[in-house]
Image (spheres, rainbow, N blue to C red):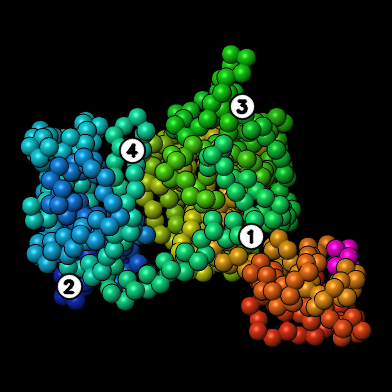
Amino acid sequence: MEIRFNGEKKEFKKGVSVGDMAYSISNRLGNIAIGAKVDGKAVSLSERIYDDSEIEIITIDSRERFPFLNHTAAHLLAQAVKRLYGKAILGCDSYDEKGFFYEFQLPHTIREEELCSIQDEILKIMNEKHEVERFELSNEEAKALLAEKGESLKLEVLNDSAGNHSFWFYKHGEFIDLCSGPHLSSAQFIKAFKLTAVSGSYWKGEKENHIMQRISGVAFSSEKEFQHHLKKMEELKKRDHRKIGKAMELFMFSEEAPGMPFFLPNGQIMKNELQRFLREVQAEADYCEVQTPYMMNERLWRQSGHWDHYHENMYFSEVDETKFALKPMNCPGHMMIFKNQHHSYRDLPIRLAEFGQVHRHEYSGALNGLLRVRTFCQDDAHLFIRPDQIKAEIMRVIHHIDKVYRTFGFDYSVELSTKPDKAMGSDKLWENAEHALKKVLEDLGISFHLNEGDGAFYGPKIDFHIKDAIERSHQCATIQLDFHMPEKFDLSYIDENNEKQRPVVIHRAISGSLDRFLGILIEHFAGVFPVWLAPVQVAIVPVSDVHLEYGERIKNELKKIGIRVSLDRKNEKFNLKIRQAQKSKVPFMLVVGDKEVDNHEVSVRRHGAKQSEKMKFEQFKEVLLEKIVKRELG
């Protein structure tokens, strides 16, 4: 069979393992290999290959190492818990590049202080130096093994997969788990780990089910990497958007509306400024802004496919004996707007944009400030185009995304996500859509990571992951190519031969969710925002009460040119007023005393600067306006 490595082709016998392939290339590669991607799918080194494939070897120093490290660490955690608490029943685990968790059903509640003893047990297991083994059992054999071990929840998982004729298991010492992988070949690749939290959850995320205990953690391939992570976690505590949001009076939450943010005046200013910026970008690109209803009839969601593929995440209500749903997405409304008129091929592209408020159900345990909510404003757009316009239009969207992210100083990576298990439409349509997106990225010379099976239910997508100030990745912008929704809504345009044709739809969002994007910005800037985005841009601090009149005068002049400005009128010591202005993270502080009054000057101090700069007030206004108009970072 023919195997492709990094563009090169090699011949191998059928049934050779990925690990043996790595050693055949070089001993060094074999020694540092921890897994591979076979035609985009992550697999363990023990995976045997029987068909022509494209293979990428994953090494212990590659960026794809973390899912392998964290998945294996999750199994070590489960093994330790089973040893320490014999009555523990295994639930489900989860892992990605950021960490792992495993859920257990236990007769007692695990306390935070017990995590240390669990960590010690994991170390003991690692010192036993077991190999990680993989084996396959038939359906009946798998049921018998899980029943023998008393793993009732794993049996439930197995029964939910009734169509499978066989199942994969992983073994580490005495520990055996139903698992499709991938895993490290040895836990010795894990050089450092930490259990970070214990929390409650529900089996399969449904509150009607068993209460589970979720233990979370992180794993690393070096001690240095681990120490760097600990420093990042300390920095993250300082940057927590919930803490900063409360201190700066940006937003709040209430038990009366769980997971639904209340934006306070300062936070609403920021949201408005972000919307203004995005509107400018859209206006330059000839987008038309629309607004669609928050709640629409059930039959629309059945027609769009959301009823079949997104029902569990939607909110429903009955009005006049008719079932309605709060919109979880804006796309069906935009399809209706397009269909409201007849269109010629000359009219296309038609670009409809909306700052639409959507509602999506999230389990309470998943809620996380602005980063995970149940309602949010989406900067959504749908581009109705001819097939020959796909490349040019996607290139334009990528340009706009790049412009927005550069404005905030974000670096980003790109991911192409393909057909998920639950999807609508034929394989041929999906193949065409995936090929179109891949070709655009390749033609633009944009490197991308292939994320198999993570597309939207109606089409493949390009996702943009921004990297913040503490090197965390956040998926925000998305470009989704959709051949299915036009079919569902019977959309058409008249071509040059006066015949009906189907348009193609591009779904596009830049921030993804304005609420979440603001949460990311709060943590990225640690509350010290660029002057154009800051809720209060200038704080005037008079040295004493005799300087209040001058302070009031320059405040009014700044307000006339649209500056958000505050004047400290409190009868307090000057140094205390300075500290309070610094604490509020206002970009510019203007100190005014006798000399400033006499010379119509201001003493300007940037937030975080140790020194002030004397400046004519008119000059300061020019500097300030330039920074705002250009949306400068500094």
- Check disc 1 and report the residue beneath it: 248
Mark closest to the chain's N terminus, 4 or 2? 2
Residue type, mark 3 in image: Met
Q: Residues within 10 Å of mark 3 (few under 14, many from 20)?
A: some
- Check disc 4 and report the residue beneath it: 202
Give coordinates of residue 210: x percent, y percent: 29, 34
Residue 220 left/right relative to 578 = left
For the residues bearing labels 2 and 3, Cβ distance under 8 angstroms: no
Q: Residues within 10 Å of mark 4 (few under 14, many from 20)?
A: some
Determine which of the numbered discs, if any, sits on residue 31 in the image: 2
Q: Does residue 558 belong to the magenta stretch? A: yes
Q: Secondary structure at mark 2?
A: helix
Residue type, mark 4 in image: Tyr
In the image, the segment drawn in magenta is 555-560
Q: Secondary structure at mark 1?
A: loop
Between 500 and 318, the residue placed more toward the observer is 318
Residue 546 left/right relative to 306 = right
Residue 44 left/right relative to 530 = left
Residue type, mark 1 in image: Met
Mark nearest the camera among 1 and 4 is: 1
Mark closest to the chain's N terminus, 2 or 3? 2
Give coordinates of residue 416: x percent, y percent: 44, 54
Measure the alpha-carbon separation of dots 1 and 4: 35 Å
Residue located at (23% from left, 70% from top): 191
Q: Secondary structure at mark 3?
A: strand
For the residues bearing labels 1 and 3, Cβ distance under 8 angstroms: no
